[in-house]
Amino acid sequence: MIRLLAVDLGGEEAYLRIHAQMWFDRLKDEPRFTAALDELRPLLDAGREEHSAELAELWEEMTMVRRSQPAGTRW
């Protein structure tokens, strides 16, 4: 049962990635969107080894499903 749920959640994650990319493509030239990205950029510019506390918390939440899968799972 849990395996089926994990497969379903993997499909949901793929759908959400496609949906997010669609919105990015639609909004990438919108001034409010680019301003919001500029506001968030410092969270990413800290460097790969030095994430901010805010990004670390978001990362843990956003990757919960992926981390629940066995190593080597293909997405």
Image (cartoon, rainbow, N blue to C red):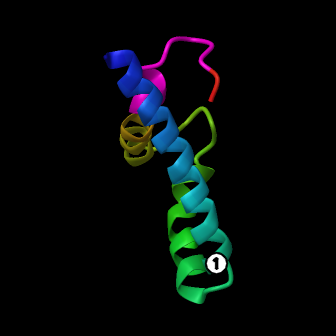
Say if 1 sits above or below 46 in the image.
above
Would you say the magenta stretch is mainly helix, strand or loop? Answer: loop
Looking at the rendering, in which quadrant would you find the C terminus? Answer: top right
To which residue does mark 1 refer?
26
Instruction: Tell me which segment is drawn in magenta.
Output: 64-73
Say if 53 sits above or below 30 in the image.
above
Residue 9, quarter of picture: top left
- Identified at 40% across, 17% down, the residue is 3
* Left or right relative to 70: residue 73: right
Looking at the rendering, in which quadrant would you find the N terminus? Answer: top left
> Is disc 1 placed on a helix, strand or loop?
helix
Q: Nearer the viewer, residue 4 or 40?
A: 4
Q: Nearer the viewer, residue 35 or 45?
A: 35
Determine the residue located farthest toward the bottom in the rendered image: 31
- Identified at 53% across, 85% down, the residue is 32
Percent of width and height locating residue 37: 56, 69
Q: How many marks?
A: 1
- Identified at 42% across, 41% down, the residue is 62
Residue 74, quarter of picture: top right
* Left or right relative to 48: residue 60: left
Percent of width and height locating residue 44: 58, 51
Determine the residue located farthest toward the top in the rendered image: 71
State yes or no: residue 63 in magenta.
Answer: no
- Identified at 46% across, 27% down, the residue is 7
Give the class, few, some or many, for how many residues have Cα within 10 Å of label 1's Cα (few <14, many ≥20). few
Residue type at mark 1: give it: Arg
Percent of width and height locating residue 68: 41, 20
State yes or no: residue 67 in magenta.
Answer: yes
Say if 30 sits above or below 22 in the image.
below
